[in-house]
Structure formats: structure tokens, C-alpha cells
Amino acid sequence: MQTTAWLVLGFPLAGAILIGLLSSRIPAKAAGYIGTASIAGAFVSAILTTLSLQDREEDARQVVFVAWDYAVSAGVDAKLSILVDPLSMLMILVVSGVSMLIHLYSVAYMESDGGYRRFFAYLNFFVFSMLLLILAANFVLLVIGWAFVGAASYLLISFWYRRKTATAAGIKAFVINVVGDIGLVLGTYFILKHSGTVDFLGTFDSVKTDFEGANGDLTAGCLLLLVGAFAKSAQIPLHTWLPDAMEGPTPVSALIHAATMVTAGVYLIARMYPLFEEAPSAAAVGAIIGAVTLLVAGTIGLVVTDLKRVIAYSTMSQIGYMIMGVSAGAYVAGLFHLMTHAFFKALLFMAAGSIIGAMGGEQSLNKMGGFRKAMPFTFVCFCIGGLALAGIPPFSGFFSKDEILLDLGAEGGWHWALYVAGYVGALLTAVYTWRMIFRAFFGEAVPEAKQLEGGHLFHPTEHVNPSTGEAEDTDVGFPGPEHHVAEQAPLMKVAMGILAFLAVVGGFLQIPFVNHWLEDFLDPTFAGSEIEIEPSDNLVIFGLVLGAAVGLLGIAIAYQLWVRKPETPALFLARFKALHTLFSRKWFFDELIDYVVVRPFAFLGRFAQQTFERIFVNGTLVGGSTGLVRAGSAAVRAVQSGYLRSYAALLLAGVLVVGFYFLVAS
């Protein structure tokens, strides 16, 4: 088991290094196959490790494997060690499995891109970083993996680096995630201060025995951990990077939203559950922020017209459900939704990539329509993903999302507010999801759809940035000249087909009144939890019926507004213009951050440049030191005249000074 556990990390790291070193010596296609094979190796290793773990007794299913001690200081022993338990293995299986399918999809989708080899090197490094974060057995290794994920996301979001919008989006994601990194490091400090160890299991044991019920340092540490979780998982107010991350290639969007990065915050809270149970006020903050995020993201999704950004806001909303769940103690439900969400969200992004390929890179819903007949496979996949996202039975999202809400309802008290917010969010989700589907696939067929029906894929003669309309070429640093759709690319179709199947059956792992396979699997990890949630049969039945009804109502509303009476949205816009402005401007979070954070720091930077740097650094330090050197060199030049009489006079003066010194001293 130890060997296969380390191979989970070894395969993607080796793939990234191999592709990076051999990029100029191997065919482009080989890079794609090497990258995909390395992730497949990690997935197989994860399966073997999980099977070995299941062969152990339940109370022995938390195993730490140590490679070496790499930092020993002040009594703190930081090891290169990994923690293998049901939680880490569930995450590893989801991340490596979905990532493998995204790699397979990318082999065809990115085929004509000039940075093909570089893309797969980055992609493998991204997956390695996420796997390292998950398997870390201590805070030091967690912080390293956390930082690696941020760096990899920057490389991939700004992959088309000649696009100004892409580089700006990459920088924005990196900077906001650095804020989260600082929170994670400071939170680690507060926890280390009291536990005396950076090891997870040691910290959990120490917290249970040493912390009092209302410990300020523990609460502060957990709140700071939440800062890291909110930044990585795009929760309010550290969420503004996520929609802009759509500037990267579509497979990157699928990877960030489905398998890596945004799920890191959910995993962090679930992993640190012993700490949050001892700091209930911090856990409450996490649950409330998750609820607010899912509602705000849902309202924005109603008005966004960029195809990928609609899906991005749905991710932000669904992660809100997960954060709300795990923060409130519904650990299995939150992780269950993380798993099913990975299936249908990766599927939706892949299907979106197929439409974007048919549109020649265009992403605006305003320019789409009528693709239902031209792209039947993509349409079916989009519908499956949309039904799962909307929470329609028997698709996977129905079981996982509703389990979170059932657990919140069973907890009672103030959790009922979260329960209600969850169903309001579910209605918004169904509306904006099917608004997107109806606008892209129904209505009058656009010219691109008509061309595709005739068997011809549209390729634009002039390439432009869909965000700005600026002209682009197709050289390295810009998207490739060719675009691909699932109907004409077998590898894309295979990846999407597998995900569509999982989006249908993934929810069967946890069916009320039938089975609790996932709960049984995760029980050894959460056996120490002091939170017991057991929804009554009546609440379960009511919740399932309500969840299905809300989802169907949302689809019906979307059908009425965008298929039967497509003129109605314009009437709503005219009547509720202020509300539309609020939603379309994304609740003015970008402007708020600009005025509160960006502009003050920019002013301080300019002030420091004009005063501190110009006067002190350039004037005093640089100017003063160079002035002293110039004066000294002038004095030395005056002495070194080249005349013998001058040297003789200096020699005589020196003899007189030495003689005078000895005379006075005696």
C-alpha cells in the first residue's frame, strides 16, 4: 500500500517533468499521451491503495507514511509524510479519475494549439499539486501543496499569455489566492502555537485534550483557515477571480471547477473537522458565507451571457452548498456533493467547449441558438449535466444536494435559515442552468449550427478575443487555428460519455432508505465527530419531494421565459432595471475591491515611489554612497600624482608622524 500511495504523487510529477524536459524532442501528440497515461497511472494507483486500505480493520484505516524528516526546528518535526485514510482516498479517486478524463478530452481539443506540449506539462503539474495538498499529513506539506496549486492555476489561466485579458485574469487569481495563502499560514501558526506539532493527527489529539470550550486562539486559527478556504474555493468576498479564470482554455476551466482548486477549501474544512467542532463560531461563519455565496452566485447566473461564465457561477454556487454543509457538520453530504459535482461540472464544461468549438471560439449566448440538431451528442450531454445540476431525480445532483439540505433541516435552530436558502438557491440553479441550455440549443439556428448540420465545421478567417473583440493571430500564446467538437472527435466523445454515465449513476452511492455506501466508507475518518445528524423519515420524504419540485419548477420557468415567450425577459429587464444592473455588475464586488483595496494600495505605492524611493533610496542611500566614493577617489587621485618629489614628501611626513607617536608614547 505504501508504494502505490507514493505512486499517486509520482506519476503526475514524473509526467510533468518528462514532458517539460523532452518538449522539443517529442511529437506534440506524444506529450498528450504521456500526460494522460501519467494521470491514468495515478488513478490506478489510487484504486489499488483504496483496496488495500479497505482490507484493514476500521480503526486502522488512518495510516501515515513517512519518507524523511525535512525540517526540524525548535522541537517541531516536519516530515515528508502522507496521510492515507478514507477521506484522502475519496478525494484522490475523484481528482485523478476526473482529471484523467479531462486529459483525454484535451488530447483532441487542444490539438492545434501552438503550446500543446507546454499545456500538458502544466496540466500534470496542476494535478500533482492538488494530489500533494490532499495527501499531506502535516501543515507544512499542506501549505506547499496549497501554494503549488495557486502557481499552477496562474500558469494555466494565463496559458494564452499573449491575450491581455488572460494574463490579467491569471494575475488576479494568483493575487487573491496569495491572500488565502497568508490566511492559511497564519492559521497554521495559531494552531501550532498551542498544539506544538504540525502533524494533523497529533494536532487533532492535542485539540481534543488541551483546548477549552471557548479558546480564542483556536477560533482565530480556524477563521484564518477559512480565509484560505474561501480564496481557493471562490467564496464571498474572495470569489472575483473565478469568473475571470474562464480566460484559460476550456479543459483548464473543467479541471479547476470539477477536480482541483475550488474543491480544496471544502477538503480543508472537512479534514480539519476536529478543530472546527471545537470552534463552533468559526464553523458558523463558514456555513453562513457558503449560504450567502450560493445565493449571490445564483442571481448573477441569471443574467450572465457568457456560456462559460454561467457555468463558472454555478460552480461558485455549488461550492457554497459544500462549504455550508461541511461547516455545519454534514461532512458526508458535503463530500458526496463534491464527488457528484465533479462529474456533471466537468461534463458541462466539456460540452460547452464543444459548442465554443462549433462557434469558432465565440462564447456569447446572444450569438448562439439552434444547435440541438447540429450537435445531438453534445446536446444530450448538456441535458444530463443540466438535469444533475438542477437536482432532478434520478440524476446524481439530486441525491447529493438534497442530502446537505436534509442534514441542515435535521439540525434545526438557526440552521433552518440555511435550509431555506438552499432551496431558494436550488430554484435559481435550475432557472439559470436551463436558460443557458434553451438559449444555446433551441430557437432559430445560427449560421454556425446550419453549417455543422451540413457536415462543415465553422473556422473563422479572422480570430478575435471573445471578451474584447480584439484581433489575434494563431501563433503560440493564442488559441490554435482549428476548433473541435465532440461530434467529430472520438476522444472528446469518450470522455464526455463516461462523465455523462457517472452524472446519472453517481448519486446511487447514497440513497435514502436504500443504501449508505459512501457514509460507511468515510466513517473511519469522521468516527470522532461529536455532531450527530439523523433526519427523520418524514423530513427525508418531504425534502426529496420538495427538492424535485423546486428543480422542475425552475426548468418550467426557464422554458416559459426563453422558449415559449422569449420576449418576456426583455419586459422584466425594463421593469426591474436596477435589479438587473445589480446582478449584471456582479453585486459590484469588483468595484468594491477596487475602491477599498486596489486604489489605496496603488496610492501608497505611488507615494512610496515618489518619496521614499526617490528621496531616501535614490537620494540618500544611492546618491550619498556614490558621493562618498567619488570624494574618496578624488582624494586618492590627488595623492597619486606620479611625481617622485611628492612620494618623497609623503614618505618623510609618514616618518615624522611615526616618530612623533613613539616620542609621545615614551
Image: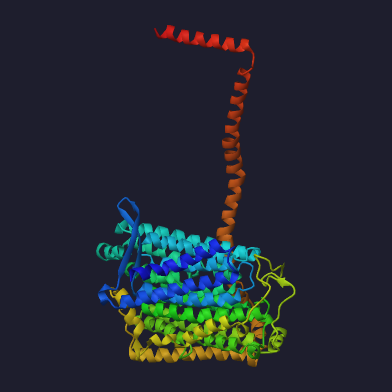
What residue is rendered at 75% in x and 74% in y? 461
Query: Observer-nearest residue: 505 or 17?
Result: 17
Tell me: 662 left or right of 588. Answer: left
Tell me: 162 left or right of 320. Answer: right
Q: Is residue 79 above or below residue 491?
A: above
What residue is rendered at 62% in x and 21% in y? 637
Query: Observer-nearest residue: 566 or 119?
Result: 119
Quarter of the figure with residue 143: bottom left
Residue 213 position, x and y percent, is: 28, 66
Asked if residue 303 can be seen in this view, the reply is no
Query: Observer-nearest residue: 657 or 16?
Result: 16
Residue 105 position, x and y percent, is: 55, 78
Residue 41 position, x and y percent, is: 44, 73
Tell me: 512 left or right of 558. Answer: left
Query: Observer-nearest residue: 221 or 477?
Result: 477
Quarter of the figure with residue 435: bottom right
Q: Is residue 188 above or below residue 486?
A: above
Quarter of the figure with residue 636: top right
Asked if residue 46 can be seen in this view, the reply is yes
Q: Quadrant of the N terminus?
A: bottom left
Q: Is residue 432 above or below residue 225?
A: below
